[in-house]
Image (cartoon, grey):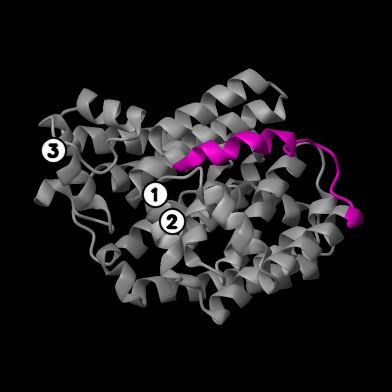
Amino acid sequence: MVHIIFLIALFCMIPELNKKYPFRFFTFAILFLFMALRYDYGNDYMNYFYNHALMNAGVYAWGSNDFLFYLLNISVPNFYALIVAISLFYIITVRYLIKNNLEVKQYWFAILILLINPYLFLVQLSSLRQTLALCFFIFAVNFAVKRKLVPYIVFVLLAAGMHSSAIILLPLYLILTERSFNKKYLFATMAILLALIFTPLFDIGANKILEYMPNHYRYYYNQGLQNSLRATLISSCYFFLVAFNIGKLKGKEIIYGKLSLIATIISILAVKVSMITRIGMYFDIFMIVTIPHIFNKIDKKMNRQLLFVLLIAIYILRYCSFFSNPLWESFRDYNTILGK
């Protein structure tokens, strides 16, 4: 059922269908209903369900330390209404990100990437706290584009109120500029990445950062779980796609390109410790904007087509792997509150 819903949502976004009437409205409506009506879908749904009940009963629960998330839970005592509100906020935010940065004819590409990469839409609808933080960060980035420091800080603090890890996003304002990403920065980035992978530099930096993070992050880090070599090689494809084309981007495209480059670097560094992908969630979403920008800069049609086939093939492999992995079994069968 999940796959059929995604196909229908993508169908409504086809540019030819939207030339006369805005069928893309149905795409966002379908995805909103998919999120809002779900029940016990995703790895964390029932955890949030029980913790919502504990918070409203005045008992300490997981997530209570994040003040704004706690306040949101006790402000909306009905958990299903809370899911509807969060779903609406997420869909509005994603629509804002797409509409504010892409041409209408590129919308379908952004939605395709959003849905075909299960670690975007599907995982984000499960991790409620970090998804809310991500939404606030998307708006914060918009203020970074306009070089408005105070609103940027405010929205990052709102994000941190939903998930404390978002506080690490504050210093990013310094690099979120439209300064072109030339070969000098590219070589420096690749040198730093290689150093992080093949020297103790990553572990030294991680331990320093973990001093300012909640204790459970150090617990995850100390588990030593790592991404497979296959997953790392796949992530490398995205890294090279962004790294070798970011120099073609202009204006605010560069800012989203930098965020996407950070996302791909974090994906590669997961070969050291997979927990880092939780931080990568703040950046992965910007790939839905950057990839269409990059394709728009490729002049030769044949090159675009070959790259598109390669990119989609990789995403399809990840999509199939996701639904066959026992870790994500809770995403296979979609249930709604209507059939509860």
Magenta part of the chain: 165-184
Q: Is residue 202 magenta?
A: no
**Secondary structure under the numbered disc 1 in the rendered image:** helix
Residue type, label 2: Arg
- Residue under the image location 42 percent in, 76 percent down: 321
Foreground label between 3 and 1:
1
In this figure, which residue is indicated by the disc labeled 2? 218
Disc 2 to disc 3, how far (Cα)? 28 Å
**Secondary structure under the numbered disc 2 in the rendered image:** helix
Tell me which secondary structure the magenta stretch mostly adopts: helix
From the top left corner, tell me how far across and down residue 206 is, in percent: 57, 56
Residue type, label 3: Ala
From the top left corner, tell me how far across and down residue 108 is, in percent: 56, 51
Residue type, label 1: Asn
Foreground label between 2 and 3:
2
Which label sits on residue 107? none
Discs 2, 1 touching: Cβ within 8 Å: yes
From the top left corner, tell me how far across and down residue 319 is, in percent: 45, 70
- 167 with respect to 321 (left or right): right
Which of the 4 quarters of the picture holds residue 91? top left
Disc 3 to disc 1, how far (Cα)? 24 Å
In this figure, which residue is indicated by the disc labeled 1? 215
- Residue under the image location 67 percent in, 50 percent down: 290
- 41 with respect to 119 (left or right): left
Q: Quadrant of the N terminus?
A: bottom left
